[in-house]
Image (cartoon, helix red, strand yellow):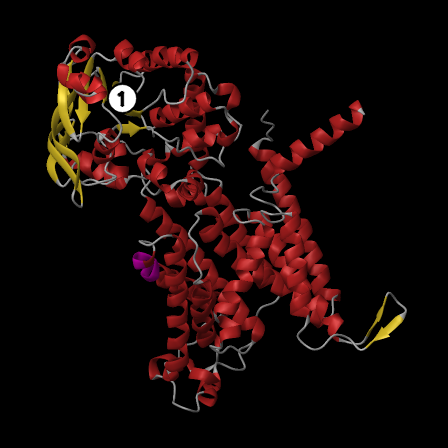
């Protein structure tokens, strides 16, 4: 797929929880290779968009197309297998496992996701699983050790790239906050995604860490040939790295464009600061 | 720092340990008295039960209380297959046994395998609906399913002989069967847990949503763990039946009490630790028997003659001991750690370095 073409398309996606409309008629797209920002006040429905895309919720109506495949009815593990990875707003690492194990868990779908492979085959794409019967092969150790070694090397390689190699054998819970955020991204990268959804990656970071994170996101985008879709509150991050920004309020898209365009949009100013006469 | 031994070294060391243990078991088999030998076998049976429940509860984090149900299925299936047709005819006095079962007769190995497979199948059927629940709801539902199985055993008289139970089951469970199956269980579950699948199961325990989002089919992996656990529970049931020689569907023998005993073993040893499960099982089996001494007349501190505690009060003493253990080791004796060659090696090298420095 060429750069700039739509990779992930949300088509009139609505998500209702009872009477509450968390996402209201969301229509937009994420284009191959871009860094797209999703901003908006608290409770605007940003994380819900991510949850709908990754299959945690099924949208009440609308369709989601990823790489030409309708992923609306698919389950989270299938969607991940197709190439969408994510991080979480409130860090959700496997706390009691080591850094290396955290990354290796994310590689597991490459040997145990026939569900995802079925979808790929149905849509005429190349399946991603490396062979079959891995459960028995891993228990009876039939050719499994080579696979384990390969996974381990790849994981260590990845940790090296993101700068966590020296912490590979530490428990995830023992990492400082900034490193935990980084590990979440590394773990998402280990699923070998085409697009990565980052949910407030800079939350709780100091200005220096934020600066590093921005470089880091740009670097992984180029190095792993990724498309990045991120939610962020820190305007410095959003304005600094996002090539395009979508602004949400009360579940609706209220503005879209480059950092400058969005910044000067009266609707955005209103959503964040209230109407002018209210301020005065 | 990650200190690791080569796979080859580990395999050789493991084989050596297996040979040494086998030799010790051979000695025990020759020289121990029958009573102690029975306890030795019970340790292995409890070990299999604890390992299989630990896979479900400790590793995958499914709080299942239905283990006794699978054990019961394994026990009845195997016992019905090893009992001779004449014996079955004699036992079934309320209602005659169903004809197709009356003449079914196999050896102990096939009976045990059949018990395990049927229990695994039951785990599959039970797991399908139950695993859609989580936490306390899952615990109650699985407990309920185990009770349903027990009540069926109580009432399907022409198959199970109802409340009378099965008697005169041949006492096939010897040291070799018990420890042979324990070895198989240990290798299977150990191999599973240390593989990519084991990591996936632990990830589900740690954070179900994150595991799903990392591409793990949570339901299928939970079901897998449930079925493997169910299979070995069935195997342990067969060994247990041929150790007890009499089984019946009472609350205490193959009912919820047994589930709670196994739960005590794995919590005591450390939820999520395979070595912990074995330690817990051994401790439980030994303590429950050894503390029988308290109920006999004994000399306190070698001086004061007592008549012993009232019958049954050893359970109180055991409870007190377990409470004390849980206060000192809040996550069980082993926590989530394992005794592995790598860990032992690391521990020894640290010990040696410490000696050199100090």
Q: Residue furthest front?
A: A280
Pick the residue in front: A146 or B257: B257
**Total labels drawn:** 1
Q: Residue furthest bottom?
A: B93
Q: Is residue B168 among what the camera can see?
A: yes
- Write down the quadrant of residue A65 in the picture: top left
Chain ID, mark 1: A
| Prevalent SS, magenta region | helix
**Secondary structure under the numbered disc 1 in the rendered image:** strand
Pick the residue in front: A127 or A218: A218
Q: For residue B125: magenta?
A: yes
| Residue bearing the label numbered 1 | A230
Q: Which of the image's four quarters has the N terminus of chain A?
A: top left
Q: Residue furthest right?
A: B303
Tell me which segment is drawn in magenta: B124-129
| Residue B56 image point, x, y percent | 45, 52
Give me the residue at 80% from left, 78% from top: B307
Give me the residue at 57% from left, 62% from top: B45
| Residue B340 image point, x, y percent | 60, 40
Q: Is residue B154 left or right of residue A12?
A: right
- Write down the quadrant of residue A185 in the picture: top left
Instruction: Judge whether B69 appears above or below A211 on screen.
Output: below
| Residue B22 image point, x, y percent | 66, 54
Instruction: Judge whether B341 appears above or below A198 on screen.
Output: below
| Residue B336 image point, x, y percent | 55, 43
Q: Is residue B18 left or right of residue B181?
A: right
């Amino acid at each position: 797929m060429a750069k700039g073409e739509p990779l992930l398309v949300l088509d009139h996606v609505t998500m209702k929880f009872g009477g509450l409309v968390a996402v209201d008629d969301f229509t937009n797209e994420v284009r191959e290779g871009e860094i797209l920002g999703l901003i908006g006040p608290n409770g605007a429905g940003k994380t819900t968009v991510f949850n709908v895309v990754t299959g945690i919720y099924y949208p009440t109506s609308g369709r989601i197309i990823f790489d030409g495949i309708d992923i609306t009815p698919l389950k989270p593990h299938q969607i991940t297998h197709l190439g969408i990875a994510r991080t979480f707003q409130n860090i959700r690492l496997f706390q009691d496992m080591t850094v290396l194990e955290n990354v290796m868990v994310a590689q597991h779908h490459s040997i145990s996701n026939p569900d995802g492979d079925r979808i790929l085959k149905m849509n005429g794409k190349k399946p991603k699983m490396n062979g079959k019967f891995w459960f028995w092969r891993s228990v009876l150790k039939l050719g499994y050790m080579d696979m384990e070694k390969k996974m381990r090397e790849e994981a260590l390689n990845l940790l090296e790239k993101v700068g966590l190699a020296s912490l590979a054998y530490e428990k995830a819970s023992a990492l400082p906050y900034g490193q935990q955020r980084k590990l979440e991204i590394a773990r998402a990268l280990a699923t070998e995604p085409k697009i990565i959804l980052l949910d407030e990656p800079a939350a709780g970071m100091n200005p220096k860490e934020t600066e590093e994170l921005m470089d880091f996101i740009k670097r992984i985008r180029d190095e792993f040939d990724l498309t990045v879709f991120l939610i962020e509150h820190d305007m410095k991050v959003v304005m600094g790295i996002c090539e395009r920004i979508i602004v949400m309020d009360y579940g609706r898209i209220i503005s879209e464009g480059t950092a400058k365009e969005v910044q000067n949009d009266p609707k955005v100013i209103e959503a964040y600061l209230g109407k002018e006469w209210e301020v005065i | 720092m990650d200190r690791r031994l080569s796979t080859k070294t580990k395999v050789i060391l493991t084989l050596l340990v297996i040979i040494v243990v086998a030799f010790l078991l051979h000695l025990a088999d020759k020289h121990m008295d029958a009573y102690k030998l029975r306890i030795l076998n019970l340790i292995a049976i409890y070990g299999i039960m604890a390992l299989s429940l630990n896979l479900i509860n400790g590793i995958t984090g499914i709080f299942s209380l239905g283990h006794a149900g699978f054990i019961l299925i394994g026990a009845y299936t195997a016992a019905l297959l090893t009992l001779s047709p004449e014996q079955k005819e004699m036992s079934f006095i309320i209602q005659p046994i169903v004809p197709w079962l009356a003449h079914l007769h196999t050896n102990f190995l096939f009976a045990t395998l059949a018990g395990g497979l049927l229990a695994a199948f039951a785990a599959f059927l039970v797991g399908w609906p139950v695993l859609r629940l989580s936490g306390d709801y899952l615990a109650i539902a699985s407990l309920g399913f185990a009770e349903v199985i027990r009540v069926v055993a109580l009432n399907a008289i022409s198959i199970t002989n109802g409340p009378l139970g099965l008697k005169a089951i041949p006492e096939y469970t010897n040291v070799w069967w018990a420890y042979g199956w324990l070895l198989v269980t240990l290798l299977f579950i150990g191999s599973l847990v240390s593989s990519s699948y084991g990591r996936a199961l632990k990830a589900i325990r740690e954070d179900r949503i994150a595991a799903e989002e990392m591409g793990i089919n949570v339901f299928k992996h939970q079901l897998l763990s449930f079925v493997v656990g169910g299979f070995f529970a069935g195997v342990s049931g067969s060994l247990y039946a041929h150790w007890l020689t009499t089984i019946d569907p009472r609350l205490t023998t193959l009912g919820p009490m047994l589930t709670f005993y196994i739960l005590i073993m794995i919590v005591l040893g450390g939820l999520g630790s395979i070595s912990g499960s074995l330690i817990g099982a051994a401790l439980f089996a030994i303590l429950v028997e050894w503390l029988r001494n308290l109920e006999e007349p004994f000399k306190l501190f070698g001086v004061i003659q007592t008549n012993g505690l009232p019958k049954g009060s050893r359970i109180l003493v055991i409870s007190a001991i377990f409470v004390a253990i849980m206060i000192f080791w809040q996550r069980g004796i082993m926590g989530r750690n394992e005794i592995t060659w790598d860990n032992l090696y690391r521990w020894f090298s640290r010990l040696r370095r410490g000696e050199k420095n100090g």
